[in-house]
Amino acid sequence: MTNEHDKKTSTGSDQEHDKPETSQNESQSRNEAPSGDDNVVEGEAEVIGSKAASPEEKNWAMLSHIAAFVALIPLIPVIGMVLGPLVVWLLKKEDMPLVAQNGVEALNFNISMFIAYCVAIILCFILIGIPILVGLIIFHFIVTILAAIKASEGGVYKYPFSMKLVR
């Protein structure tokens, strides 16, 4: 003789066994790539033209971001962070579309950073600019490295807080 409590527990346990099967089927259907672009992974940015871009083009695209570190050379001070990406972009924008896209992004970001550095240096006279300047240097370094990595994969990194001055 079974009581109603046993029936509810057995029914509930059957439902629990059914749930993982349906959730596995649902997760498998979600993980399957759509018949469209294979470069797009769920939760990640699209890697633009990674199969079409040659290794040389990826290297030049990466160099367009790393060229901002020209500013570290004592002969070319702060303005070098704009001149580096500008030179790479002007040299290769006609031949390599990936370099053109990355060069514009790097150039816009470094112009924005140049303006921010100028404001921070002016604010150093009232002492609030010192922590701002330190934060800008750290932010600039990290974001430039992230952009260079993305460019070496064949993608285009969209910088945060970048003014679109060059198109």
Image (cartoon, helix red, strand yellow):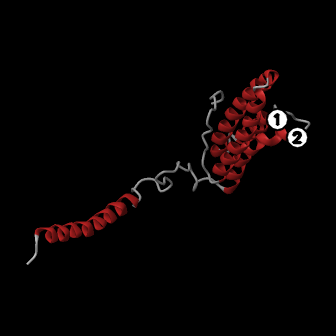
The secondary element bearing badge 1 is classed as helix
The secondary element bearing badge 2 is classed as loop
Tell me where residue 138 sits by quadrant: top right
Q: Residue at x 78, y 30 (%)?
A: 130
Q: Residue furthest bottom?
A: 1
Q: Which disc, if any, is residue 72? A: none
Q: With respect to residue 6, does 164 lie above or below?
A: above
The x and y percentages for residue 155 are: 60, 48
Q: For mark 1, does the 10 Å Cα neighbourhood hold few (<14), some (14 to 19), or many (20 or more) residues?
A: many
**Number of numbered labels in the structure image:** 2
The x and y percentages for residue 104 are: 66, 36
Frontmost residue, 69 versus 35: 69
Callout 2 amino acid: Ile
Do residues under tags 1 and 2 come within 8 Å of each other at their CB atoms?
Answer: yes
Callout 1 amino acid: Gly
Q: For mark 2, does the 10 Å Cα neighbourhood hold few (<14), some (14 to 19), or many (20 or more) residues?
A: few
Q: Residue at x 40, y 60 (%)?
A: 31
Q: Residue furthest right?
A: 75
Q: Residue at x 73, y 31 (%)?
A: 132
Q: With respect to residue 3, does 100 lie above or below?
A: above
Q: Residue at x 10, y 75 (%)?
A: 2
Q: The N terminus lies in which quarter of the figure?
A: bottom left
The x and y percentages for residue 114 are: 75, 29
The residue at which mark 2 appears reads as: 73
Residue 44 left/right relative to 20: right
Residue 44 left/right relative to 16: right
The residue at which mark 1 appears reads as: 80
Mark positioned earlier in the residue sequence (1 or 2):
2
Q: The C terminus lies in which quarter of the figure?
A: top right
